[in-house]
Amino acid sequence: MSKIQAPKGVSEYFPPRSDNFDFVRSTLISAAKVSGYSMMELPVFEDTELFIRGVGESTDVVSKEMYTFEDRGGRSITLRPEGTAGVMRSVIEHNLDKGQLPIKVWYSGAFFRAERPQAGRYRQFYQVGVEAIGANDPEIDAEVIAIAHRAFTELGLKNYRLDITSLGDAESRARHRVDLVKYIDALTLDEATRSRAALNPLRLFDDKREEVREAMSGAPLLLNYLNAQAANHFAQVQELLTEMNIPFSINPKMVRGLDYYTGTTFEFVHQDLGAQ
């Protein structure tokens, strides 16, 4: 009989390694708690339609990476690939948005994406997340970034950087899309890439192929299309981060792989985590 092993792409945490895992998770959660965020415990699986509508049908997560199956009742069920869609479903289902705003919650747990395992990337991975819902405020944006910065500082992390940008509001994105689509239409692209661009042209900025990156080097940037309100919002976020002594760099080509992102967008980048 062959030896049964853990599935490929799963990182297990057992003593003494589990002590490090618990320390990291607890430190991340503590940073959210002291900032006034309350716990939200989410289902590990949801109706597939939630992620199709909430994350975006054009995203790699939905089109390629979800663990989806049919349960005994014939319903399409998906293991959660991310947390925000589930948080929003819970907020709406339980009428939390009818109460005091903003709603500030944190969550943690296992998430699942059926992608090729590589250094720093797993099919089952663990995440601590925060959501502040119901207020379009630069101070909230800066607060969320500050929570992550505080947690990483308390963990003792070194050699990482904070990149920020703005994905604008609906008006800014619409004006930018017109010129971006014109630019992309003039490029020589394979059919799959062109189909992806038709659904969300911003995704081409995130393409890892050198020939596509080179082709997009002269593409119009969304930051240059922000209307006065969106530009002022992003400027205030930068001022607040500077006041809190949180160093950052502006990355105008940053995009997200999930369609619900708008406004201030950020990522902490660490060179020693692995392939991504």
Image (tube, grey):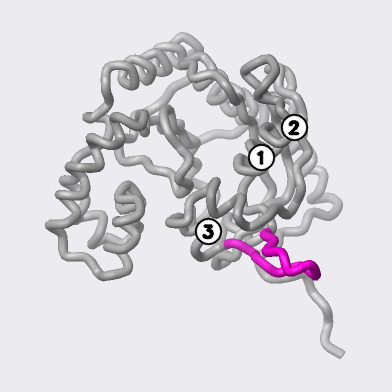
Verify CB contact (< 8 Å) between mark 1 and mark 2: no
At a point 59% along the width and 62% down the height, the residue shown is 66
Where does the image place residue 157, in percent across and percent down from the top left?
Answer: 59, 34
Closer-to-camera residue (53/105):
53
Any magenta on residue 1? no
Where does the image place residue 241, in percent across and percent down from the top left?
Answer: 46, 16
Closer-to-camera residue (259/154):
259
- Residue positioned most to the left: 186
Any magenta on residue 77? yes
Name the secondary structure under disc 1. Answer: helix
Query: In terms of sequence position, does the residue under pointer 1 or pointer 2 come before the other?
Result: 1
The stretch in magenta equals: 66-78
User: Which tag is nearer the camera, tag 3 or tag 1?
Assistant: 1
- In this picture, is 187 found above or below 235? below
At a point 35% along the width and 58% down the height, the residue shown is 208
Amino acid type, residue under disc 1 in the picture: Arg
Q: Which mark is residue 62?
A: 3
Name the secondary structure under disc 2. Answer: loop
Determine which quarter of the picture holds residue 146.
top right
User: Which tag is nearer the camera, tag 2 or tag 3?
Assistant: 2
- Residue positioned most to the bottom: 1
Determine which quarter of the picture holds residue 222.
top left
Determine which quarter of the picture holds residue 191.
bottom left
Q: Which residue is mark 1?
A: 89
Where does the image place residue 136, in percent across and percent down from the top left?
Answer: 49, 19
Q: Which mark is residue 239?
A: none
At a point 30% along the width and 29% down the height, the residue shown is 171
Q: Which residue is mark 2?
A: 94
* Picture mark count: 3
Q: Is residue 204 left or right of residue 34?
A: left
